[in-house]
Amino acid sequence: MNLYRKYFKRIFDILFSSILLITLSPVIIAFILILKCSKQRKAFFLQERTGLNAAIFKVIKLKTMTDEKDEYGNLLPDGKRLTKTGFFIRRNSIDELVQLINILKGDMSFVGPRPLLPKYLPLYSAEQNRRHEVRPGITGWAQVNGRNNISWKSKFEFDVWYVDNLSFWVDMKIIFLTIKKIISGADISRDGHATTETFNGNN
């Protein structure tokens, strides 16, 4: 039995998310105020995502895009709504900091497959759907192996690999590599896309 997977991973999540929320609260509050005073005047972005055992929860992030719409009432493309402040926040993964609240609540973990939109659920293969056997994470094996600059197929393969190989040392390796990615700013978006492209199912 993997004791880390069954017990200690969750204990570490609660302990370190509490410590980081307290420690980083001045930084989080500062960016909340910056966003409140910016063009968009909103600091938070809430969206339904799929978590452990495909349960739906609301992920919380700092808002990096405006709500600008075209003449027909449709949201403009992500690239046109992403603000300069938002780009800086995304590049440095600052928008993910408030997800510490999701970790504390038990919706997420520090490490795991990224939580995706519920509308993707019918599109997964049986193997890809195994990504929901663990809590989703702020960072994961797919994020340190290409993040947004790899195909959906590759992302899901990395996610399932993590499910099968989850351990304390794998999590530590992912956290270390994530810090390197943040510093370098690598793989923020896929070529030709301001944000992650939509998953349209398997060919």
Image (tube, rainbow, N blue to C red):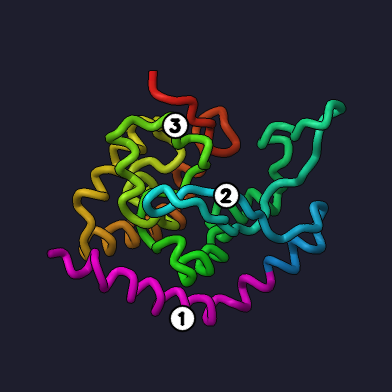
Q: Quadrant of the C terminus?
A: top left
- Which residue is farthest left? 1
Pointer 2 local density, CA inside 10 Å: few below 14, some 14–19, many at least 20: some
C-alpha distance separating marks 1 and 2 = 26 Å
Quarter of the image for residue 138 reads bottom left
The magenta stretch spans which residues? 1-30
Question: Which residue is rendered at x = 33% and y = 43% of the image?
Answer: 145
Question: Which residue is rendered at x = 46% and y = 61% of the image?
Answer: 107
> Please, is residue 117 above or below residue 88 in the view?
above
Residue nearest the viewer, comparing 122 with 65: 122
Residue nearest the viewer, comparing 77 with 123: 123
Q: Which comes sooner in the sequence, label 1 or label 3?
A: 1
Q: Circle 1 sits in a helix, a strand or a loop, which is it? A: helix
Instruction: Report the side of 12 relative to 34 (left or right).
Output: left
Instruction: Report the side of 24 relative to 127 (left or right).
Output: right
Q: Which residue is mark 1?
A: 19
Question: Which residue is rendered at x = 59% and y = 77% of the image?
Answer: 25
Residue 97, horizontal then vertical, whole percent: 54, 64
Q: Which comes sooner in the sequence, label 1 or label 2?
A: 1
What kind of residue is marked 1?
Answer: Ile
Question: Which residue is rendered at x = 40% and y = 75% of the image?
Answer: 14
Residue 6, horizontal then vertical, whole percent: 24, 66
C-alpha distance separating marks 1 and 3 = 37 Å
Q: Circle 2 sits in a helix, a strand or a loop, which is it? A: strand
Q: Which mark is residue 48?
A: 2
Q: Which residue is mark 3?
A: 122
> Please, is residue 46 above or below residue 32 in the view?
above
Q: Per the image, is 2 magenta? A: yes
- Which residue is farthest right? 71
What kind of residue is marked 2?
Answer: Glu
